[in-house]
Amino acid sequence: MNPDSVLNGFRILIGHNEEEYQVFKADSLFSDEGAMMKNNINGFKHVNLLVVIAVIAAAVAVAGCSGTKAPQSQLDFTAKSATGLIITNNGGDPVILKDEKITVKRAVNDKVIDGLWGVPLYGSAPEFQEAPAVDTLKPGQKIRHIWKEPLSLGEVLLISVQDAPTGKTIVDTKVTVT
């Protein structure tokens, strides 16, 4: 069978609806007659490539210019057996407490203490802080959570604070109860 005769039997339709269809014989794809189709396909590829580049550039711009970053602060934790957990901002950015979620667990068995599993440092019910609660922890300021039940001296706590807007962990530390 002659390959040329097989190609002559095929037709290719290009278009979006019946009125726009252009008919090409398969063997004319590489002739002058098929040059129009070849140019249409190349143009289509270029438009698609430009669209893909534009979408990627927009995604990079949105991700890079969102302005959202976790606070850069030096938080210090002191766990007192009878009185509670004290958090001090020893410098850096002020911490917007409604955006920060704290988890406090016992190191020995991962048991959550006082229901503090992803609890906002401000605006939770019940409130994490003793009254009067503050919404921003500025450098030099302290907040305190009073334990529901006293903890054992020497007990080790795992404390994690996560910045909710960015999803980044800003503190992950161990604290010994004194």
Image (cartoon, helix red, strand yellow):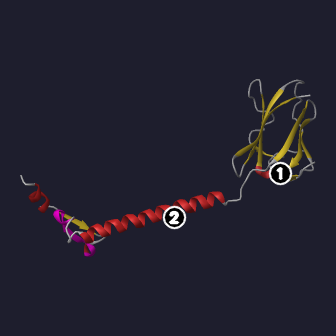
Comparing 34 with 110, the one in front is: 34
Name the amino acid type tagged 1: Val
Residue located at (79% from left, 52% from top): 98
Q: Quadrant of residue 80?
A: top right
Q: Is residue 21 magenta?
A: yes
Circle 2 SS class = helix
Residue located at (62% from left, 60% from top): 62
Q: Residues within 10 Å of mark 2 (few under 14, many from 20)?
A: few
**Furthest residue toward left:** 1
154 sits left or right of 171 in the view: right
Q: Quadrant of the C terminus?
A: top right
Q: Position of residue 2 (x, y in %)?
A: 7, 54
Mark closer to the chain start, 2 or 1: 2
Residue located at (74% from left, 28% from top): 110
User: Mark number for residue 126?
Assistant: none
**Furthest residue toward bottom:** 19
28 sits left or right of 131 in the view: left
Which residue was labeled with disc 1?
A: 95
Part of the protein shown in magenta = 19-29
Comparing 23 with 138, the one in front is: 23
Which residue was labeled with disc 2?
A: 54
Circle 1 SS class = strand
Q: Quadrant of residue 148?
A: top right
Name the amino acid type tagged 2: Ala
Q: Residues within 10 Å of mark 1 (few under 14, many from 20)?
A: many
Q: Position of residue 160 (x, y in %)?
A: 77, 38
Q: Is residue 105 magenta?
A: no
> Eyeballing the image, is 115 above or below 121?
above
Residue located at (12% from left, 62% from top): 8
